[in-house]
């Protein structure tokens, strides 16, 4: 288990804010690929969440009860997408707790794909999304990545 968990909210925020998002110097290639997968996935999730907000607002005119449920689900998805971006930024800083949290996100993606595939003739499944997040998670745990996390932890 990671021993470098956040102690307060400021520990969760990316060091230096979001301006360092595009700087990946010093990361091994496996972590660079994993980082970009998580960042791009998070950005696409935010964009999809914004579109979902508009759709939920439009749905209020036709079916207010269904629109409330859709709005709630969209807000949860939007929060997860933002959290994924923040976790990727913290993983890039060498925080093992963020790497573990991103691995859990990949696991949740598997559960949601299984549930989505079993409901409504598989219309809601997202196996491609799960496979991408699983690949990103595996890249974070390869030996070269492990060595980098150990080296960063030794410098802190």
Image: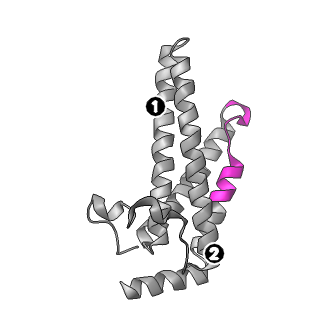
Q: Is residue 22 above or below residue 69?
A: below
Res 100 visible: no
Q: Residue furthest front?
A: 19
Label 2, on which residue?
30
Quarter-wise, where is residue 98 in the image? bottom left
Which residue is depicted at the point 40% across and 83% down?
Answer: 153
* Quarter of the N terminus within the rendering: bottom left
Residue 58 screen position, x and y as percent: 55, 19
Per the image, label 2 sits on a secondary structure element best described as helix
Instruction: Describe residue 95's horizontal placement relative to residue 35 as left or right.
Output: left
Q: Main secondary structure of the magenta part?
A: helix
Q: Nearer the viewer, residue 136 or 12?
A: 12
Quarter-wise, where is residue 15 in the image? bottom left
* Quarter of the C terminus within the rendering: bottom left
Q: Nearer the viewer, residue 100 or 42?
A: 42
- Magenta residues span 120-133
């Amino acid at each position: 288990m990671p021993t470098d968990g956040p102690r307060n909210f400021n520990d969760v925020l990316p060091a230096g804010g979001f301006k360092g998002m595009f700087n990946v110097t010093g990361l091994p290639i496996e972590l660079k690929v994993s980082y970009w997968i998580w960042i791009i996935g998070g950005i696409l999730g935010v964009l999809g969440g914004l579109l979902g907000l508009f759709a939920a607002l439009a749905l209020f005119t036709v079916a207010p009860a269904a629109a409330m449920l859709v709005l709630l689900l969209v807000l949860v998805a939007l929060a997860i997408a933002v959290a994924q971006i923040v976790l990727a930024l913290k993983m890039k800083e060498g925080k093992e707790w963020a790497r573990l949290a991103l691995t859990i996100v990949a696991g949740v993606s598997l559960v949601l794909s299984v549930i989505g595939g079993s409901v409504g003739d598989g219309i809601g499944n997202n196996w491609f999304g799960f496979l991408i997040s699983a690949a990103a998670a595996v890249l974070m745990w390869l030996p070269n990545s492990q060595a980098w996390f150990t080296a960063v932890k030794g410098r802190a």
